[in-house]
Every structure is written in C-alpha cells, then in structure tokens.
Amino acid sequence: MNKDTAPNTASGQAKQTVEDPGVYAPGLKKIRVRRRWLWLVILVYLPAMKLALDSPDYRFWAMMVFGTWLLLLILAVGFACVLRCPRCGQLFHTHGPTFLPLRRCLHCTLHVNADKRPAEPPPPDKLAAGSNKNRPT
C-alpha cells in the first residue's frame, strides 16, 4: 500500500505509517541516470568549446560544438522533464511550466536517493489544520 496514512479500524482515526523506499528503487534509478546525463551535458560544454576555439579552423568547430551541445541539451532536458515520480505519479522535476532539476519531487517531496536512505515519514498534509500558523492575520 502506497498510502501516507492508513485508517485505524479501532478508533476510526488515521495513523501515520512509514513507507518502504525500496518500492521506488527502479523509478528513482531512472531519475538519477537521466539527471546525470543532464549535468554531464551541461559540464561538457566549456571544455569542448575551449578545444574548438583552440583549433586552426575555430569558426567551423565552434559552430559544430555549439550546435551539437545545444541538441544534446534539448534532448537531456526533455528526457528529464518527462520523468514521473514513483510515489505520486506527477512529473518529478516539473511543476506547471517550470523545470527545476532539484533533488526532491516538486509535488510529494520524495528525495531522489530515498531508496538508498533510511525510511522517513511521509510529508505532512498541506491542508492540515496547523498549516496556517505563519499566515498573517
């Protein structure tokens, strides 16, 4: 069961359970691999451009490196954008039109290394009664 809360049959109240992060391992591995590709493409640009600019035919090679890098960047960002969170099923790095390659799901706050860490309790419900404490009156 992937629910954050399970009903307590004796009192009718919901009790908080800790999820097994191993269930999410295949999905999180896919997320980590695509994140590595994205950061690799970003980091390769400067050394590749330096080599291109140091060549005798630098204009041609600079255009080739930039074009190839731009195509790879578009593909890497596209593949990172469409990853679904294994816990909530929403897009992991995308909230609305915004792409944020952070380490946590933008919807349920599942960490990208949750399957390699000790289990943590699920996030508190955003609609809980105590969530309006910091709100100005």
Image (spheres, rainbow, N blue to C red):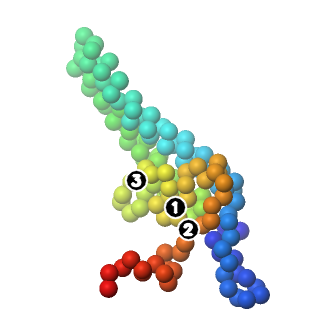
Rendering coords of residue 2 (x, y %): 67, 67
Tell me the mark number nearer the camera, choosing from 3 and 1: 1
Label 2 vs label 1: CA separation? 7 Å
Q: Is residue 60 above or below residue 76?
A: above
Q: Is residue 137 above or below residue 55?
A: below
Question: In the image shown, does 136 or 70 lie closer to the viewer?
Answer: 136
Rendering coords of residue 124 (x, y %): 55, 72
For residue 109, the mark is 1
The residue carrying pointer 1 sits among few (fewer than 14), some (14 to 19) or many (20 or more) residues within 10 Å by Cα, namely some
Q: Amino acid at mark 2?
A: Pro
The mark that comes first in sequence, 2 or 3, is 3
Q: Is residue 45 left or right of residue 88?
A: left
Instruction: Kindly check if marks 2 and 1 are in contact, taking CB atoms under 8 A apart as contact.
Output: yes
Label 2 vs label 3: CA separation? 20 Å
The residue carrying pointer 3 sits among few (fewer than 14), some (14 to 19) or many (20 or more) residues within 10 Å by Cα, namely some
Rendering coords of residue 119 (x, y %): 66, 58
Q: Amino acid at mark 1?
A: Thr
Q: What residue sits right under mark 3 in the picture?
A: 100
- Numbered label tally: 3
Q: Is residue 108 left or right of residue 47?
A: right
Q: Name which quarter of the figure residue 55 lies in.
A: top left
